[in-house]
Amino acid sequence: MGKKDIVTKDYMKDNEVFADAFNFLVYGGKQVIVPQRLRPMDSAQMALPYGTSGTAAPRQGYRDGLKYLAAMTDETKAYLILGTEHQSKVHYAMPVRNMLYDAMQYAAQVEKAAHFHRQAKDSRGHGGGEFLSGFYKEDRLIPVVTLVICFHGEPWDGPLCIHDMLSSQDKEVLPFVENYRIHLIEPFSIKEEQLRLFRSSLREVVTFLKYSKDPLKLDKLVKNNARFQELDYKAARLIKECTGAEIEISESEGKANMCKAFEEWKRMEREEGIKEGKAEGIKEGRAEGTFMILNDLVKEGILGIEDAAVRAGVSAREFDERMKSLER
């Protein structure tokens, strides 16, 4: 597991951040999912795909994040299983990956129901189909919602649904192919006025990622946002890892002043640029001095143009043109 994966998973474990992501995308920023009602789940899921030999080959998949909602506030007392997938790069098979994870979760629920009925020995009064499947007519599944979060500032140019991945786009066939879609939080496409819909530090994370390729805009936003002055350490660490920004942040106080860190980073970038510029100037100066010496040697008849050109690292024609330009 790479460092980015570790950092993003650690950040998304926070119930406030986790709930914020779903409230943003599902409920348009309304605080419907209450962080205190979220409970962690085992992210390991088991499936039994069958190979050509007909033998079952267990396969295990790990979601990046998985929690269940203890109870909704409405009268139906519905439950939800919420999963997140964190992407530092575009995943071009994401619809298939999420579809598999969700199917595995539903399969696990069916198996759990069947296990419960076997333990309870309550098959009397239930039909043969119910007995064979282990899932009774009155049994119900808990809805599963998977959210993909992009922890980068690039546009998502991958497929958004199964239909986007198909080789055949036959209009007669497509209606019979289930079109599994992914639900995406993509900083690049989020409008600036939508950023306020986030309530947690996810607002600053998404903001920084969105404008990570626009330093002037980012500089203005960081300076004018007081929330960047006391940013959660885990959020600041995620920003550093996912953008590659060489910013210094301290874990000691649990908070990070991104304004100071950003200013220090810009200062270091300027100094590095000056150093590189000076080095390039010295390099160019040395190259020019070498050419002048070779030019004199050609004029004195000690070297031919072809030989001098080889030593200067240019073609004979380029060397001759530079000689002529010096005489003007």
Image: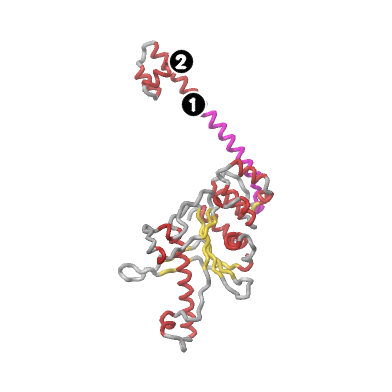
Residue appearing at x 36%, y 17% in the figure: 305
**Residue 235, percent across and down?**
60, 53
**Residue 203, percent across and down?**
62, 54
Q: Secondary structure at mark 1?
A: helix
Q: Residues within 10 Å of mark 2 (few under 14, many from 20)?
A: few
Residue 116 against residue 274 in the figure, above or below: below
Residue at image mark 1 = 283
Residue at image mark 2 = 326
Residue appearing at x 56%, y 35% in the figure: 272
* Mark toward the viewer: 1 or 2: 2
Q: Secondary structure at mark 2?
A: helix
**Residue 105, percent across and down?**
48, 69
At label 2, which amino acid type do we have? Leu
Q: Residues within 10 Å of mark 1 (few under 14, many from 20)?
A: few
Q: Quadrant of residue 290?
A: top left
Residue 276 magenta-drawn?
A: yes
Residues drawn in magenta: 252-280
Residue appearing at x 47%, y 63% in the figure: 62
Residue 310 is left or right of residue 228, and the answer is: left
Going by the picture, which residue comes out furthest to the right?
226
Give the overall secondary structure of the magenta segment: helix
Residue 312 magenta-drawn?
A: no
Q: Quadrant of residue 169?
A: bottom left
Residue 79 is left or right of residue 310, and the answer is: right
Lower position in the chain sequence, tag 1 or tag 2: 1
Going by the picture, which residue comes out furthest to the bottom?
124
